[in-house]
Image (cartoon, rainbow, N blue to C red):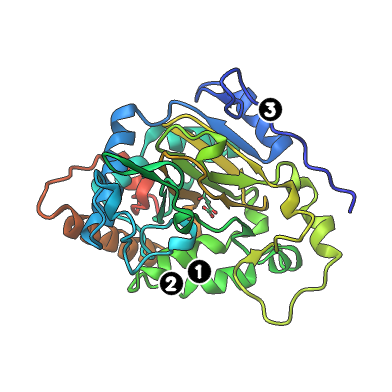
Amino acid sequence: MSFKAPYLPRDDEGYTVSFLPNETEHIAEFFDEYGVVVIRDVLSPADCEASVSEMFEIVESNSTFRRNDASTWDSWPANSIPQYGNISRAPIFTPQFLKNRANPTLHSVISTLLGRDDLIVNHDRAGLMRPTTNVQTSPTTNSDFPRWSTKPNLHLDMNPWTWLSDPAGIYQQNVLKNLSYERLADFITENNQPIQSTGTSIQALFNLLDNKKENGGFVCVPGFHKHFESHFSSIPAPENPSAGHNFSKNDPIFQQAQRVTSRAGSLIVWDQTLPHGSFPNKSNQFRAAQYLRLFPRWLLTRKQLKYRLIVIFTEAQRVAKGQNVVWSAEEVRALGGVVSEE
Ligand SMILES: O=C(O)CCC(=O)C(=O)O
């Protein structure tokens, strides 16, 4: 294998090098070289605090876990994906999570990076990794909890052979056409259908707590977006196509995964052709992240967008339990609202 991932540079505090939202040229250059870039100060400290609190509320209302009592942290929601730290299988529609998805800086950074303003945001899950070492479970006891550790993983949220063999995305468009949004799982299916001819497809996450290497979290193989085609065109496609691709731990590509570390409030953006995933938490701090993707709104029909938006606001109303959340026209548009010219 000829590919050697470039090493992601770090700043003085040991975080992956990052940029402010208005450093658009640096963001574009870094993203082009590495296929991943960190933009700091996108969410405010108050946004991060409210987001993490909403995540704890989800865990607490679906288990006997209590955020301030580590002796309860064995308990975890049944309908979740604990091996990857996901707190639910369904997408999350809490008020702050929706506000984050409509964040104007998120939309302007991605629109500038991709050179287009026809993007809407997805509605996805979140990851909360429990501390695993030196956890204080009583005033006199500190213990390690390797059983709370998540599984190291590296994957693609797409079928790489479908991407290569069908640039026009006939297969993916058929999948997208069938999304009725009557099932919340349709919001998850939506994520794995990037289409090559629409240009670079991006995924992203909001990092909600300061995240150093030992805290676990996002990893990727920098630079692989330039190697994707030669790699997958030399491997025969499996007989049964699936909407994702997992790299095994023994795969030399897996060995090249690097942690991307960042401060709370940072946005990590990556090219969807970049193998990515997460490494486990080896510290006594939590790791918290909200997953995102932005994609061209016209990949969905006007009818789909209308129904999708009804589902988003119905879920938001149900989750907010009567709390009145007011949305500006721009926020509604960012979340996937139908706009008058369509
Ligand atoms: O940072 C993480 O937890 C992994 C994110 C991920 O794999 C994804 O969003 O597809």
Instruction: Give, as a three-letter code, the residue at label 1.
Output: Leu
Q: Which residue is mark 2?
A: 179
Q: CA distance from mark 1 to mark 3?
A: 38 Å
**Closer mark to the observer between disc 1 and disc 3:** 3
Residue 176 tag number: 1
319 to the left or right of 116: left
Task: Give the distance between the C-alpha atoms of the residues marked 2 and 3, in whole angstroms.
Answer: 40 Å
Q: What kind of element bears circle 3?
A: loop
Q: Which residue is mark 3?
A: 9
Left or right of residue 92: residue 264: right
**Quadrant location, the C terminus:** bottom left
> Which of disc 3 and disc 2 is earlier in sequence?
3
State yes or no: discs 1 and 2 in contact (Cβ < 8 Å).
Answer: yes
Q: Which mark's residue is nearer the viewer, 2 or 3?
A: 3
Left or right placement of residue 238 versus residue 140 in this view: right
* 192 and 334: which is toward the camera: 192
From what the image shows, is residue 63 above or below residue 227?
below
Sequence-earlier tag: 1 or 3: 3
Residue 195, x across and y down, in percent: 62, 60
Horizontal and vertical percent for residue 218? 55, 45
Q: Ligand 1 closer than 8 Å to the CB at disc 3?
A: no
